[in-house]
Image (tube, helix red, strand yellow):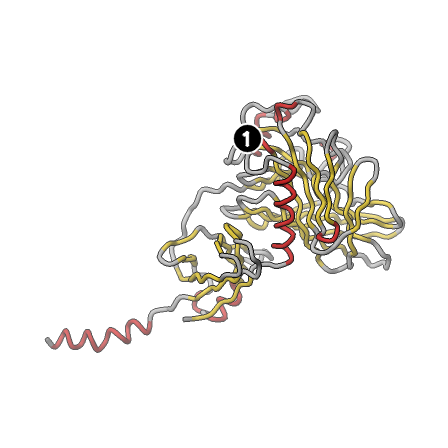
Amino acid sequence: MTSLRTLFFVLPFILAAQPKDVTVTVRNPLDIERNGEIVSVDLGAIRHLRPEWKGVTLEVMDGRTALVSQSIDNDADGIDDEIIFPARIAPRGKRSYSLRPGPRREHPSPVDVRYVLPRQDIGWENDRIAFRVYGSVLAGNVDNGIDVWTKRVAYPVVAKWYKESEGSLPGKDTYHQDRGEGADFFSVGRSLGAGSAGLLYNGRLVQPGLFDHHRVIGNGPLRVSFELYYTDAVIDTHRFTLVKRITLDAGSQLNRIDERYVSNASFAAELAAGLVKRANTVPAAVPSDGVLALWGPTNADSVNGFLGTGVVLPASGTLREDSTQVLITMPVEFGRSISYLSGAAWSRRGGITSAAEWSSLLASASRRLRHPLIVTVSSR
């Protein structure tokens, strides 16, 4: 009996000493469901509430279910800066999740980013689509455009396709033929491709060339993110540098691109994001929403279905075009980052199979970009 009384006396103090979870509340300001959208939680704010959690592996709980999550060190200082997880929030709704110390879990990753030698390309992908940018003259007559690799499988293919193409003659890479998983049907040349960007200066487009070096920030299981550095770009006599951060989440057709231009010179320019023209494609745009889209046959062979490319700016834009591409522009401030979306969808992958569906996805993405989920943290 004495032991039982002691237990009842001591138990409340033991429970009170246990570290409490941190509550993460996610609010949706829009009247559309946010299903599977990736939420980011600032780990600096978490460590402010729970200093003892520094260096501790955390897990995200939805009730009693542990969600797939990913911790990311954005500035390469060895300390994770954010933890991300997929949320499902009803229209105008809110939902609470909890963070707590937990085991390190391994999850299959549908996303991947890699630096490919000897070509010096960067290739990245998720379960929906794949992209690459070029890093050397081995790619031919190219600039900073984004290439699209259309895939109809959910698993990663970029490393496999590059490996299978080793030893191929220039221009005869095997990944240009669909052998069951998809292919690279896209032609970029010196254009911006599928939504890369340059600067519009005195009415002409200036692109920064090939990237000089890169840094991978995160690589799955929910997100890939990396930075490209262009350090020797020139407009007339004005030198400038560009840091471009590209982020792609699992399940998304669109990259988030954060660009920061820096120059010691003073000159006015606009950001110009562009889509390369393709035969029989039809452009569609809503400049007030910052949306530009192309939709049409993937290539001359009808068996390869249809391909959409698109850009979503964070504010209204101005439409322009030249002989090779359609552009949407907006003011840019040197030294400050500007964020926009760009990407592609292939009808043979499923999900997006028409121009109307592609335009609808971009319209929804515009609203989400301008009205992000609102995340707050509190201790219980």
Who is closer to the viewer here, 153 or 225? 153
Q: Please tell me whether residue 188 is drawn above or below residue 372 in the rendered image.
A: above
Q: Residue at x 41, y 71 (%)?
A: 380
Q: Quadrant of the N terminus?
A: bottom left
Measuring 49% from the left and 56% from the top, which residue is drawn there?
Answer: 89
User: Does 17 appear above or below 331?
Assistant: below
Q: Residue at x 37, y 54 (%)?
A: 65
Q: Position of residue 178 (x, y in %)?
A: 59, 24
Residue under label 1: 160
Amino acid at circle 1: Lys
Residue 79 seen anywhere in this rendered image of the structure: no
User: Front-most of 359 and 314?
Assistant: 359
Residue 332 as seen in the image, left or right of residue 376: right
User: Left or right: 119 with respect to 329?
Assistant: left
Residue 138, image x, y percentages: 72, 31
Tally the marks.
Answer: 1
Tell me residue 100's x, y (percent).
40, 62
Name the quadrant containing residue 63.
Answer: bottom left
In the picture shown, does residue 81 fall above or below 139? below
Of residues 285 and 263, the one drawn nearer to the viewer in this rendering: 285
Q: Nearer the viewer, residue 78 or 43?
A: 43
Residue 202 location in percent, x, y? 89, 50
Is residue 259 visible from the viewing direction of this image? yes
Task: Tell me: 22 left or right of 354.
Answer: left
SS at badge 1: helix
Q: Residues within 10 Å of mark 1 (few under 14, many from 20)?
A: few
